[in-house]
Image (cartoon, helix red, strand yellow):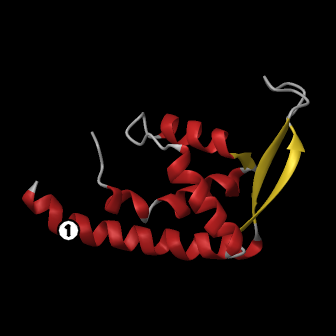
Amino acid sequence: MHFSDNLIRGTVAPMVLAMLAERPMYGYEIIKLVNARTGGKLQWKEGTLYPALHRMQADGLLTAAWEEAPTDADAAGRKRKYYHITRKGRAHLARQAKQWKELAEAVDAVMLRWC
């Protein structure tokens, strides 16, 4: 199923922050993880992710650093840009998660009657 850009746009930042709250990740790893966790329902591309990462970095929600890939990784020794959630990013994620839950309940209360 294809989702409209308007529906996707508001979900990118909170989803990225939620994944980075688990551990630091590089961009392509985030894309693969979203695709896997959503069972392929969301097929993010670089054009979806990287502008959001840059905005969140500018807003102080995350930081980025070039780091070597772990020795057990396919690209051992290769440098990748890893993104790390900041304290401000964690606080933002907590607010967004609460808002998302309330919004989803409100939308479901209306939409599930129709579906």
Please name whichever residue, 111 or 47, is drawn nearer the observer in this view of the structure. 47
In the image, residue 53 above or below residue 33: below
Q: In the image, residue 92 lies at what x, y percent?
A: 61, 75
In the image, residue 64 above or below residue 38: below
In the image, residue 20 above or below residue 96: above
Numbered label tally = 1
In the image, residue 37 above or below residue 95: above
Q: In the image, residue 54 lies at what x, y percent?
A: 65, 63
Q: Residue at x 34, y 57 (%)?
A: 5
Q: Which residue is mark 1?
A: 109
Amino acid type, residue under disc 1 in the picture: Ala
Q: Residue at x 51, y 68 (%)?
A: 97
**Quadrant in which the N terminus is drawn:** top left
Res. 16 visible in picture: yes
Q: Is residue 108 left or right of residue 115?
A: right
Q: In the image, residue 9 lies at what x, y percent?
A: 42, 62
Q: Is residue 49 left or right of residue 71?
A: left
Please name whichever residue, 8 or 114, is drawn nearer the observer in this view of the structure. 8
Secondary structure of residue under mark 1: helix
The quadrant holding residue 41 is top left
Q: Residue at x 78, y 49 (%)?
A: 82
Q: Crowdedness of circle 1 by 10 Å Cα count: few (<14), some, many (20+)?
A: few
Please name whichever residue, 76 or 105, is drawn nearer the observer in this view of the structure. 76
